[in-house]
């Protein structure tokens, strides 16, 4: 089963960098100010928000996909 994840890095109120499908299994959102944190730590501190399938969330936190995507989006030009 392919897991679909949408990552959102918020730069401002209506300014987000988004990667992933709109019908994702889980949507992960983090403010750009917290994007340098390890995503697992940010989640435990309540800074990384997730909506959707918790199992999918824990999988992408564990395998490093979340860290890579958040880093890509946070370093937008």
Image (spheres, helix red, strand yellow):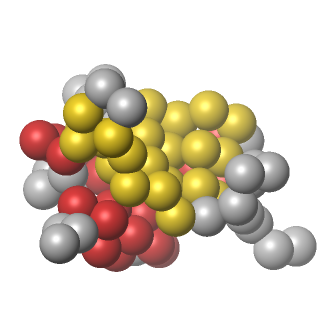
Task: Say which of 54 and 13 sits in front.
Answer: 13
Q: Quadrant of residue 62?
A: bottom left
Measured along the vertical axis of the image, is residue 34 above or below residue 67? above
Q: Say whether residue 68 is visible.
A: yes
Q: Left or right of 63: which side holds 27? A: right
Residue ID at (72%, 51%): 22
Q: Quadrant of residue 53?
A: top right
Q: Position of residue 52 (x, y in %)?
A: 70, 36
Measured along the vertical axis of the image, is residue 35 above or below residue 62? above
Q: Quadrant of residue 34?
A: top left
Q: Say whether residue 55 is visible.
A: no
Residue ID at (88%, 73%): 1
Q: Left or right of 42: which side holds 65? A: right
Q: Position of residue 72 (x, y in %)?
A: 30, 73
Q: Position of residue 8 (x, y in %)?
A: 44, 49
Q: Position of residue 66 (x, y in %)?
A: 42, 63
Residue ID at (11%, 41%): 33
Residue ID at (65%, 40%): 54
Q: Left or right of 32: which side holds 4? A: right
């Amino acid at each position: 089963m392919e897991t679909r994840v949408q990552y959102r890095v918020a730069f401002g109120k209506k300014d987000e960098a988004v990667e992933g499908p709109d019908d994702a299994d889980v949507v992960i959102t983090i403010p750009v100010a917290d994007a340098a944190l390890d995503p697992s730590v940010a989640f435990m501190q309540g800074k990384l928000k997730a909506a959707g399938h918790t199992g999918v969330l824990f999988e992408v936190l564990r395998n490093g996909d979340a860290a890579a995507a958040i880093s890509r989006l946070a370093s937008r030009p």
